[in-house]
Image (spheres, rainbow, N blue to C red):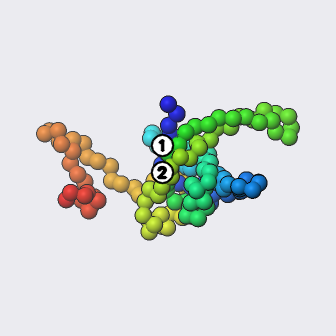
Amino acid sequence: MNKVILMGRLTRDPEVRYSAGENSMAIARYTLAVDRRFKRDGEATADFIGCVAFGRQAEFAERYFRQGIRIVVTGRIQTGSYTNRDGNKVYTTDVVVEEQEFAESKSVSDSHVGHASMGAPAQSAPSPSVASADGFMNIPDGIDEELPFS
């Protein structure tokens, strides 16, 4: 099974081209900055993953996606290769987009557009406290408004 789910921020606006011929199709390419789960030397790191969308998905990306917004992409990994002008073989790996959607509200997304650090988390959440003797985690002050059941 070849299935990929990614959440990250666009590093730049999607690049959209249209195929030649009578039934031209939109092809959108964009790169997602996806935060790594673990930090290296105390600093957040990110992977920059190329994505390609076709047809209606590409048209949607062209119309609504902008640098800095957070999206979720579902698709498959596709590898390929070509020979460049210098005669060297170049290997490629892309995620072919099957589904894509916004991962945050427009107002939150607008506040991140144009930020220089694409790998930085959207908000610095307080770190959770150590579990108490009864096994439950103490909730730090200031995040109770984020809990849906409070």
User: Label 2, on which residue?
Assistant: 72
Mark 1 Cα shell of 10 Å, populated few (<14), some (14-19), many (≥20): few
Instruction: Identify the residue at horizontal 48%, vertical 43% (top origin).
Output: 5
Name of the residue lying farthest toward the top: 1
Does label 1 or label 2 sit earlier along the sequence?
1
Could you tell whether 104 is left or right of 18 in the image? left
Q: Is residue 2 visible?
A: yes
Residue sticking out furthest to the front: 22
Q: Name the mark on residue 106.
A: none
Mark 1: amino acid: Ile
Q: Is residue 25 left or right of residue 121?
A: right
Could you tell me which residue is drawn at 73 percent across and 34 percent down?
Answer: 81
Q: Nearer the viewer, residue 57 or 13?
A: 57
Element under disc 1: strand
44 in relation to 110, above or below: above
Residues at discs 1 and 2 in contact (Cβ within 8 Å): yes
Residue at image coords 18%, 42%: 136
SS for callout 2: strand
- Image coordinates of residue 86 in percent, x first then y, are 86, 38
Q: Is residue 81 above or below residue 75?
A: above
Which residue type carries mark 2? Answer: Val
Nearest the viewer among 16 and 57 is 57
Q: Which residue is mark 1?
A: 5
Q: Where's residue 83, x and y in %?
A: 80, 35
- Quadrant the C terminus occupies: bottom left
Answer with the quarter of the image where residue 58 lies.
bottom right
